[in-house]
Image: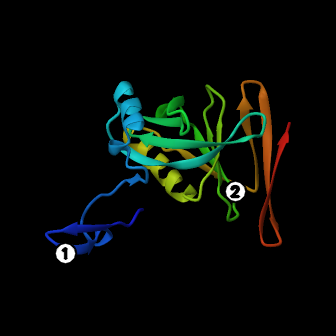
């Protein structure tokens, strides 16, 4: 979770020491008009998570995006244009796929649509927020699949496999079309 310094009654206080439930809103959505407007149009009010991520397209390109999670949905927003690119109901998410290595990749599996492959330094927090969000809105627990290779649907009729291997100085990631 985020740690912020706040000033209360003229004294600095570390917010993590207070009994405040601070969500993972790293972009301050209520004070960012275009993000706030997107959520208002959809009727969502509670932000579980908001941060910049890298999203992988079906062609393998990386795009800078904003990932928003509320108590009802996942939003993918283009930060350059401020437009909503995708909205997925939390109830539509079946599982999350992760590697067993220290990398930043995760796939959000949505059986009724194509999946979302992301990279974020806050991968663990995203997974925790997805688990919390789906638990609070449905009667099933989201499956977390951990392996050094898994398949995901990059597009409607395109399956890709992502493979993670330990390499000198880190993790080597390969994305292959099946």
Q: Looking at the image, is mark 1 or mark 2 earlier in the sequence?
A: 1
Mark 1, secondary structure of its residue = strand
Residue 16 position (above or below residue 78): below
Q: Quadrant of residue 12?
A: bottom left
Q: Quadrant of residue 57?
A: top right
- Other residues around mark 1 within 10 Å, as few (<14) / some (14–19) / many (≥20): few
Is residue 66 found left or right of 47 in the rendered image?
A: right
- Position of the N terminus, as image quadrant, is bottom left
- Position of the C terminus, as image quadrant, is top right
User: Residue 140 appears at what percent x and percent y?
Assistant: 47, 40
Q: Is residue 169 visible?
A: yes
Q: Which mark is residue 11?
A: 1
Q: Which mark is residue 99?
A: 2
Q: Is residue 87 visible?
A: no
Is residue 62 found left or right of 121 in the rendered image?
A: right
The answer to which of 73 and 109 lies nearer the viewer is: 73
The answer to which of 109 and 126 lies nearer the viewer is: 126
């Amino acid at each position: 979770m985020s740690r912020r310094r706040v000033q209360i009654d003229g004294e600095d206080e570390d917010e993590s020491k207070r009994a405040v439930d601070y969500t993972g809103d790293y972009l301050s959505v209520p004070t960012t008009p275009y993000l706030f407007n997107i959520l208002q149009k959809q009727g969502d009010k509670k932000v579980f998570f908001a941060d910049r991520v890298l999203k992988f397209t079906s062609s393998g390109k990386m795009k800078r995006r904003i990932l928003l999670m509320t108590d009802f949905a996942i939003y993918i927003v283009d930060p350059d244009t401020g437009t909503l690119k995708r909205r997925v109901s939390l109830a539509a998410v079946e599982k999350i796929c992760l590697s067993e290595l220290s990398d930043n990749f995760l796939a959000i599996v949505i059986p009724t649509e194509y999946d979302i492959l992301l990279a974020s330094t806050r991968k663990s927090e995203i997974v925790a927020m997805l688990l919390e969000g789906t638990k609070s809105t449905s009667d099933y627990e989201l499956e977390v699949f951990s392996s050094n290779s898994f398949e995901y649907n990059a597009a409607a009729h395109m399956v890709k496999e992502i493979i993670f291997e330990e390499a000198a100085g880190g993790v080597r990631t390969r994305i292959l079309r099946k």
